């Protein structure tokens, strides 16, 4: 089937390319991978957003949204070239679908200016022309992003080039190459809960249970060799610092925008919401992927607290199965990727401030306290009325450069193919900062060189003070289909910490 013809085919046409890992279904305690749609041969893929009811674990369930399933969506694998997508909205509310990390023009970016009405189908053609990376897609409906993503409108997209064997990287989906969509959810008497109050808007909505691929309390079963973990922090707000219970290092091989030149050995790795990382591990029997919640209260609330005050919780137990073939047995020395540039004297500059109104957060000191363990993690939640509908956007004070987001206002006009250095500042709390339509190099963080794990390509970075980011936009974005820049704490984005810009 030709790529252009795919957009006129039925949504069911993509079923033949769906892979459902059989091994995961043999053990009820084993972590299941999302279905895999490999769009490289068909030249396209189809997703249908729909309502459902999802069981996260025995006694934990709720009304949810998902792409072609009850919760979340399949992993979509693409290569270079044109990929025709068909996104059907089978729900009763308006949605959008943003390709977070794809380097595509504004008219197919899927931001808030590209709504998909109930019963409608959006048919963008994505021209993939970028290096291998783990990207993702999610709802980006203005004022409703936090609720819709929390309910399940998110999924992973892998950009691949078929050369992982040359690099010595694990690549067998669901066996030694695992996709982990990590979130925190709040449950009330076993029912999935989302109805934010002022505190939830201030710090972002924080859950009481860790969820991996929509599952609670599952175990990853892997071969006794090198295993690749593609980690996406798809929480609404929680920042997590990951490590291994065995004390063995994690070898970082890719950040948001693609592979590093060589693996980087780390004892811990922090990911804010929206960030991705690919790591290689060599787990032992009974190993576990751990995390510590990184405190993110407004400045007055965290002056006397340290990140390492938070207790460690288990994200995912890892069991080694000797009967599985260990295809990769050593960490590669090099990956063949080039380093991002770290200087450009001809770049245009822009000052960007991530603003919360004066006095916001005063007296909000406690935050979400760590409580008992549920599915490996407990963070004593704040309870209230049931419901999946949010309170909407509109909390005064959230802004970029002093102005809350306005769909009708263009905040910046960017010159295409001209290097940009953006100096991004936050003086109140940490904000994960995301830019559509590009990837960037972190030149500095608070006036010094960034940490080694930040020296690869990024599209989302945690701003704790001031950062200098070097980027270039290769694709256009018009006034009617502009690119976004925003905080990726989704409640902050909905409340106005977002701006938009054109590229021409």
Image (cartoon, helix red, strand yellow):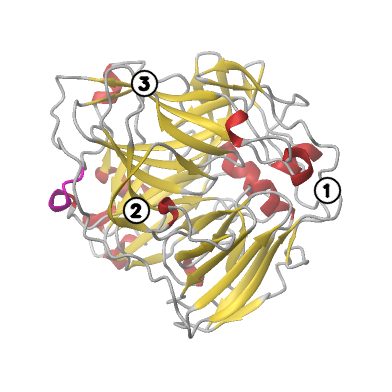
Q: Which of marks 3 and 2 is nearer the N terminus?
A: 2
Residue 19 image-quadrant placement: top left
Confirm or deny contact between disc 2 and disc 1 (CB under 8 A). no
Q: Which numbered marker is on residue 219?
A: 3
Foreground residue among 11 and 169: 169
Q: Nearer the viewer, mark 2 or mark 1?
A: 1
Give the farthest residue toward the front.
448
Residue 147 screen position, x and y as percent: 65, 42
Distance of mark 3 from mark 2, alpha carbons?
30 Å
Distance (Cα) linking label 3 and label 1: 41 Å
| Disc 2 to disc 1, C-alpha distance | 44 Å
Which label sits in the foreground, 3 or 2? 3
Residue 392: image x %, image y %? 75, 47
244 relative to 398 in the view: left or right: left
- Mark 3 nearby-residue class (10 Å; few <14, some 14–19, many ≥20): many
* Mark sitting earlier along the chain (2/1): 2
Instruction: Indicate the quadrant containing the N terminus: top left, top right, bottom left or bottom right.
Output: bottom left
How many numbered marks have been drawn onto this rendered protein structure? 3
Segment tinted magenta in the rendering: 165-169
The question of residue 168 being in magenta is answered with: yes
The question of residue 149 being in magenta is answered with no
Q: Which residue is labeled 1 in the image?
A: 360
User: For mark 2, what is the residue?
Assistant: 45
Q: Position of residue 255 (x, y in %)?
A: 39, 52
In this orientation, which residue lies closer to the viewer: 115 or 318?
318
Residue at 75%, 46% (x, y): give it.
299
């Amino acid at each position: 089937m030709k790529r252009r013809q795919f957009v006129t085919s039925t949504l069911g046409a993509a079923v033949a390319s769906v892979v459902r890992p059989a091994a995961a279904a043999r053990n009820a305690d084993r972590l299941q991978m999302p279905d895999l749609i490999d769009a490289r041969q068909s030249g396209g893929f189809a997703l249908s957003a729909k309502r459902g009811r999802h069981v996260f674990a025995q006694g934990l369930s709720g009304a949810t949204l998902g792409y072609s399933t009850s919760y979340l969506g399949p992993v979509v694998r693409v290569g270079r070239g044109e990929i025709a997508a068909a996104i059907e909205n089978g729900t009763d509310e308006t949605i959008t679908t943003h390709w977070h990390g794809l380097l595509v023009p504004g008219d197919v970016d899927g931001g808030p200016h590209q709504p998909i009405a109930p019963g409608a189908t959006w048919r963008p053609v994505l021209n993939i022309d970028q290096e291998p990376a783990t990207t993702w897609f999610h709802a980006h409906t203005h004022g409703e992003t936090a609720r819709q993503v929390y309910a399940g409108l998110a999924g992973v997209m892998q950009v691949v080039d078929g050369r992982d064997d040359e690099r010595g990287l694990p690549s067998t989906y669901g066996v030694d190459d695992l996709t982990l969509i990590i979130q925190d959810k709040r449950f009330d008497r076993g029912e999935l809960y989302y109805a934010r109050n002022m505190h939830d808007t201030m710090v972002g909505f924080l859950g009481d249970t860790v969820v991996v691929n929509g599952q609670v309390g599952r175990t990853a079963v892997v071969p006794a060799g090198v295993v690749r973990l593609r980690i996406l922090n798809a929480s609404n707000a929680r920042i997590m610092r990951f490590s291994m219970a065995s004390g063995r290092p994690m070898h970082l091989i890719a950040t948001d925008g693609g592979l590093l030149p060589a693996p980087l050995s780390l004892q811990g790795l922090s990911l804010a919401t929206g960030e991705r990382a690919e790591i290689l591990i060599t787990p032992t029997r009974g190993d576990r992927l751990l995390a510590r919640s990184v405190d993110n209260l407004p400045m007055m609330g965290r002056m006397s607290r340290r990140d390492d005050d938070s207790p460690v919780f288990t994200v995912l137990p890892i069991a080694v199965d000797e009967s599985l073939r260990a295809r990769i047995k050593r960490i590669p020395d090099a990956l063949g990727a080039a380093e991002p540039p770290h200087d450009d004297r001809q770049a245009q500059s822009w000052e960007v401030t991530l603003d919360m109104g004066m006095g916001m957060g005063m007296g909000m000191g406690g935050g979400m306290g760590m409580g008992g363990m549920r599915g490996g993690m407990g963070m004593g939640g704040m309870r209230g009325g049931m419901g999946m509908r949010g309170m909407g956007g509109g909390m005064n004070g959230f802004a970029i450069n002093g102005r809350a987001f306005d769909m009708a206002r263009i905040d910046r006009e960017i010159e295409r193919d001209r290097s940009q250095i953006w100096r991004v500042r936050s003086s109140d709390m940490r904000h994960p900062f995301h830019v559509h339509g590009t990837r960037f190099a972190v030149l500095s963080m608070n006036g010094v060189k960034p940490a080694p794990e930040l020296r690869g390509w990024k599209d989302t970075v945690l701003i704790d003070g001031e950062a200098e980011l070097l980027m270039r936009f290769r694709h256009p974005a018009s006034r009617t289909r502009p690119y976004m820049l925003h905080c990726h704490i989704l409640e902050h984005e909905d409340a106005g910490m977002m701006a938009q810009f054109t590229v021409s």
